[in-house]
């Protein structure tokens, strides 16, 4: 399965209450997400894509913005 931009942004806005989430929102480094929210986001990505995210892949380079998340999931699937 593929995670889409719209699905990811909807999840961030509706489930994680990040009202102004857009493609380049810095999620973790800016403090928009705490560690619990990040775990919830990772679980959502795994459920949406069917992939298993390894701990060593959870970096700011891969997960700090929605565009990085989408790039990571597309490259991994």
Image (cartoon, grey):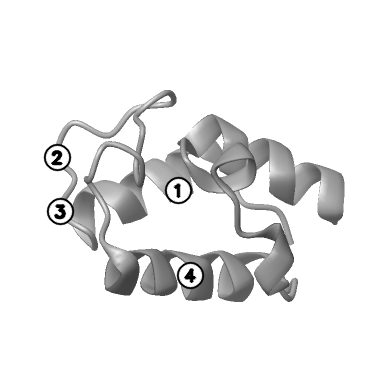
Please report contact status of discs 3 and 2: CB closer than 8 Å, yes or no: yes
Residue tagged 4: 44
Which numbered disc flags the more N-terminal residue, 3 or 1? 1
Query: Rounded to the nearest whole Å, what is the CA distance between mark 3 and mark 4?
Result: 14 Å
Which numbered disc flags the more N-terminal residue, 2 or 1? 1
Badge 1 marks a residue whose secondary structure is helix
Q: Is residue 64 above or below residue 56?
A: above
Please report contact status of discs 3 and 1: CB closer than 8 Å, yes or no: no
Residue 52 seen anywhere in this rendered image of the structure: yes
Q: Is residue 4 above or below residue 43?
A: above
- Residue 8, disc: 1
- Residue at point 70% right, 36% down? 71
Query: Rounded to the nearest whole Å, what is the CA distance between mark 4 and mark 1?
Result: 9 Å
Query: Rounded to the nearest whole Å, what is the CA distance between mark 3 and mark 2?
Result: 6 Å
Residue tagged 3: 17
Give residue 77's quadrant in the image: bottom right
Which numbered disc flags the more N-terminal residue, 4 or 1? 1
- Residue at point 36% right, 33% down? 26
Give residue 11's quadrant in the image: bottom left
- Residue at point 14% right, 39% down? 19
- Residue 19, disc: 2
* Front-most of residues 54 and 1: 54
* Front-most of residues 53 and 61: 61
Q: Is residue 52 above or below residue 35?
A: below
Query: Rounded to the nearest whole Å, what is the CA distance between mark 4 and mark 2?
Result: 18 Å
Which numbered disc flags the more N-terminal residue, 4 or 2? 2
Image side of residue 55 versus residue 8, left or right = right
Label 2: few (<14), some (14–19) or many (≥20) C-alpha neighbours in 10 Å: few
x then y, percent, for residue 41: 42, 64
Badge 4 marks a residue whose secondary structure is helix
């Amino acid at each position: 399965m593929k995670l889409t931009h719209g699905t990811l942004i909807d999840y961030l806005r509706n489930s994680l209450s990040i009202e102004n989430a857009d493609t380049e929102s810095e999620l973790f480094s800016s403090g928009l997400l705490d560690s619990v929210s990040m775990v919830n986001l990772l679980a959502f990505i795994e459920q949406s894509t069917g992939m298993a995210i390894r701990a060593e892949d959870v970096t700011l380079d891969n997960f700090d913005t929605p565009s990085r998340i989408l790039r990571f999931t597309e490259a991994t699937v």
